[in-house]
Image (spheres, rainbow, N blue to C red):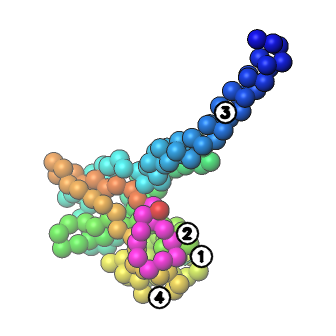
Amino acid sequence: MERRNFFLSTLSLLSAGTVAAMAAAPAALHALSPLLKRAKNNHDWHDLGPVEDLTADQPLKKTIEVVRKDGWQLRRQDQAVYLIPGAGGPVAVSSICPHLGCPVSYSAESAQFECPCHKSFWGPDGKRTSGPSPRDLDPLPTKVEEGRLYCRWVTYQTGIETPVEA
Ligand code: FES
C-alpha cells in the first residue's frame, strides 16, 4: 500500500471511530442516568432508631447522611428529616421546601414548620398553612424492621403542586 493510501485509510478509520463514539455518548449517558439519579434519590434505608424512642407529641428532627452529586463527584452530606406523630406511628417528611428548595425547620415555640426564604409555613402535621410553597411537606418512604424505623431519602421537584421525584 502506498504511504498516501495508508495515511488516508488510517484517517478514515479514526474519523469513523470518532463518529461512532459521538453517537454512543447519549446511550452511555442514558445508561449512567440511574446512577446519577440514585445519587439524588438515595435508595439506601437510613436507620432512625427504635420506634418507641421516636414517638413524640411534636415533630422530631433526625439527621441522615445522603449522597449528593456535585458535577461528576458524589459526596456525602448530612440531611435533616422530620418525624411527625401519626396514628399508625411516625411519618417521615423532607426538610426541603417544596417552593424553591430552602431548608425548612420546625419551631416548637410557634408550633409550625417554617421556611425562612420566602416565608412558607406548615402546621405540625406538615400541611401547608401559608406562603408560596405549592404543597405540603414531602413524604419520605419509611419501613419498620425488628422494631427500628428506617427512612429513604427522596429529592423532589420544587415549584409544582404534586410531589414528583427529581
Ligand atoms: S424556598 Fe421556601 S418559601 Fe421559597
Does mark 2 have its CB less than 8 Å from ligand 1? yes
Question: For the magenta stretch, what is the residue range?
Answer: 155-165
The residues tagged by marks 2 and 1 sit, at their Cα atoms, a distance apart of 7 Å
Q: Is residue 8 above or below residue 1?
A: below
What amino acid is found at the position of numbered circle 1 in the picture?
Cys
What amino acid is found at the position of numbered circle 4 in the picture?
Ser
Question: In which image quadrant can residue 52 be found?
Answer: bottom left
- Which label is found at residue 117? 1
Where does label 4 land, which residue? 130
> Can I make out residue 124 in this image?
no
Q: Which label lies toward us, 3 or 4?
A: 3
Q: Residue at x 60, y 43 (%)?
A: 23
Nearer the observer, 153 or 39: 39
Does mark 1 have its CB less than 8 Å from ligand 1? yes
Q: Residue furthest bottom?
A: 130
Where does label 2 land, which residue? 102
Mark toward the start of the polypeptide (2 vs 1) = 2
Mark toward the start of the polypeptide (4 vs 1) = 1
Where does label 3 land, which residue? 16
Nearer the observer, 30 or 60: 30
Mark toward the start of the polypeptide (1 vs 3) = 3
Secondary structure category for the residue under label 1? loop
